[in-house]
Image: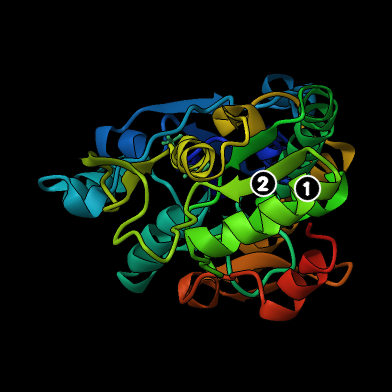
Amino acid sequence: MLRIAILTGGGDCPGLNAVIRGIVKARREEDEVIGIKRGWKGAVEGVYVNLSDDDVEGIHLLGGTILGTSRVNPFTVKNGVEKAENNFRNAKIDALIAIGGDDTLSVAAKFSSKGLKVVGVPKTIDNDVSNTDYTFGFHTAVNVGADAIDRLQSTAKSHERIMFVELMGRDAGWITVEAGLAAGAHLILIPEFPRTIDEIIEILDKRMKTKRYAVVAVAEGFKPTELETVVGDKTTVDAFGHIRLGGIAHYLAEIVEQKTGYETRSVVLGHLLRGGTPTAFDRILGTRYGVEAMKLVQRGDFGRMVALRGNEIISIPLEYGVATKKVVPYEYYKLAEMFFG
Ligand code: F6P
């Protein structure tokens, strides 16, 4: 008999509940699954709930995570690692399935190297975990983003304005480039490919002179070449050292209006991108990841992360997922660029 714990860490993400349900449904009759509440915070504090078939009934339809989440890092909490290890021992946990993005998974990899039996599941709307084609949650975020940009097209056109729409994406512009491409944004700005304000104005001015309106999709982590740092609240830093981003759309809207005289507005999509019900794609991907994670546990295949390769669910060493960020390649951005202006 095995006692398997699950935790969900980092930002919430559509599809988390599908993973949890997949794990619980794939357990053997003799095994027990328990949920750790609030990510690594609950691991340090020892807060657990039992998870039965009844507890996961229908939850794959719901956004968020029934376990709650946090951005706590046990390696930066006083005695956090020892406390978590003691709690795992006292709760007789045989294995842990950690569902998270690179921060949560990097903590999981550290625990794994200390001997904990861990399996990782890659989660993030940002789609920036390496060595998996997709993380779940990304598809939903792209759909929400594309729908918002679609809607901004008609108001931008009616008022002959430039609308700047800001989408999440700290280091990787996947959501912005895909939502922008799908909804026909006239300029897409992402962290991987900085541009000067003059370059931005040149593209927009050309478009405004002929079409008289424009929609610009900008990732929160985009930094115009002239700025030394990204736009955000630099005084608020999380346990993984990230500042709170936000404000680049407003910054660009103001400076472009000042310099060109075109009327501008800015919209921040922020957490709308990750709230609410997951798409069918994310429900299915989350379900497949959860079932495969449980299979790895049953095979005793630890220190690994499930991943999507083509249409196959595979597994890779956990460190491969967290070693580097998966960013948008130049060829892909070039494709989007064909439709600028
Ligand atoms: O989880 C990833 C993410 O959505 C990033 O795109 C964004 O920068 C960050 O989370 C926002 O985090 P929080 O919800 O803690 O403000």
Q: Is residue 251 left or right of residue 234?
A: right
Question: Would you place residue 132 above or below residue 211 in this image?
Answer: below
Q: Position of residue 37 (x, y in %)?
A: 43, 29
Q: What sort of colour scheme is used for the picture?
A: rainbow
User: Does the numbered disc 2 mark a residue whose Cβ is under 8 Å from ligand 1?
Assistant: no
The image quadrant of residue 92 is top left
Circle 1 residue: 209
Residue at the image point whose x is 73% and y is 23% from the top = 62
Residue 205 vs residue 6, the one in the foreground: 205
Label located before the other in sequence (1 or 2): 1
Residue at the image point whose x is 58% and y is 38% from the top = 33
Residue 257 visible in this rendered orientation of the protein: yes
Circle 2 residue: 217
Q: Is residue 263 left or right of residue 302?
A: right
Which three-letter amino acid code belongs to the residue tagged 2? Ala
Question: Would you place residue 304 above or below residue 330 in this image?
Answer: above
Q: Position of residue 70 (x, y in %)?
A: 39, 35
Which quadrant is the C terminus positioned in? bottom right
Which three-letter amino acid code belongs to the residue tagged 1? Lys
CA separation, marks 1 and 2?
Answer: 20 Å
The image quadrant of residue 229 is bottom left
User: Does the numbered disc 1 mark a residue whose Cβ is under 8 Å from ligand 1?
Assistant: no
Q: Position of residue 170 (x, y in %)?
A: 48, 53
Residue at the image point whose x is 86% and y is 72% from the top = 310
Q: Dot 2, how many residues are within 10 Å of its Cα: few (below 14), some (14-19), or many (20+)?
A: many
